Image (cartoon, rainbow, N blue to C red):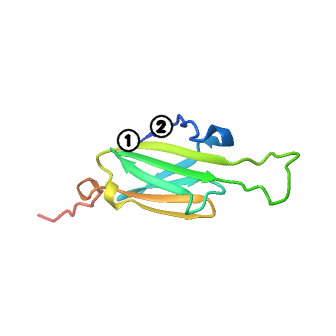
């Protein structure tokens, strides 16, 4: 069953002058009988810099890591950069977008995407004749 469709083309950074690189965070998707569980690895992203929304059945995950230059110092060599994570998925009509739950812990984003009641797996009781 295809409940989620990937969109892997990252969008250009909003502010090119700051040289913010846009990355596709790696994502794992698992399922149980009632929901999909999406886990995205977005190192450095905090709750405040994470943006998750559903619009027209498209789930968007975006997060940004900003690095501040220490006051009074000048960079002479820098490999660590500010970066932006962006990933989009098209949700099937079976997902209850109003009931999606999200949490973040140390840059790992976990979403629970419940199926609508009418599309949940259920056991059928068999009665003896």
Q: What percent of the width, then of the height, locates residue 79? A: 80, 45
Q: What percent of the width, then of the height, locates residue 81? A: 73, 47
Q: Seen in the image, is 112 located left or right of residue 86?
A: left
Q: CA gap, disc 1 to disc 2? A: 14 Å
Q: What percent of the width, then of the height, locates residue 3? A: 37, 45
**Quarter containing the N terminus:** top left
Q: Nearer the viewer, residue 31 or 52?
A: 52
Q: Nearer the viewer, residue 16 or 82?
A: 16
Q: Nearer the viewer, residue 13 or 63?
A: 13
Q: Give the residue at mark 2.
A: 7
Residue found at x 55% / y 37%: 10
Q: Seen in the image, is 114 located left or right of residue 8?
A: left
Reply above or below: 108 against 54.
Answer: below
Within 10 Å of disc 1 (Cα), the crowding (few <14, some 14-19, many 20+) is: few
Q: Are marks 1 and 2 in contact (CB under 8 Å)?
A: no
Reply above or below: 29 against 48.
Answer: above
Residue found at x 22% / y 60%: 124
* Callout 2 secondary element: strand
Within 10 Å of disc 2 (Cα), the crowding (few <14, some 14-19, many 20+) is: some
Residue found at x 54% / y 57%: 50
* Viewer-side label of 1, 2: 2
Q: Seen in the image, is 125 located left or right of residue 25?
A: left
Tell how many labels: 2
Q: Nearer the viewer, residue 127 or 26?
A: 26
Q: Which label sits on residue 125?
A: none
Q: Give the residue at mark 1.
A: 2
* Callout 1 secondary element: loop
Q: Residue furthest right?
A: 76
**Quarter containing the C terminus:** bottom left
Mark 2 or mark 1, which is nearer the start of the sequence?
1
Q: Seen in the image, is 99 located left or right of residue 51?
A: left
Q: What percent of the width, then of the height, locates residue 12? A: 57, 36
């Amino acid at each position: 069953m295809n409940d989620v469709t990937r969109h892997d083309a990252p969008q250009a950074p909003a502010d090119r002058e700051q040289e913010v690189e846009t990355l596709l965070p790696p994502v794992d998707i698992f399922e149980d009988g009632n929901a999909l569980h999406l886990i995205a690895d977005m190192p450095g992203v905090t709750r405040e810099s994470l943006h998750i929304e559903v619009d027209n059945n498209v789930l968007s995950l975006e997060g940004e890591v900003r690095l501040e230059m220490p006051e009074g110092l000048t960079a002479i060599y820098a490999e660590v950069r500010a970066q932006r994570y962006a990933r989009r998925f098209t949700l099937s009509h079976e997902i209850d977008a109003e009931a999606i739950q999200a949490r973040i812990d140390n840059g790992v984003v976990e979403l629970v995407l419940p199926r609508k009641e009418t599309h949940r797996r259920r056991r059928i009781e068999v009665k003896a004749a």
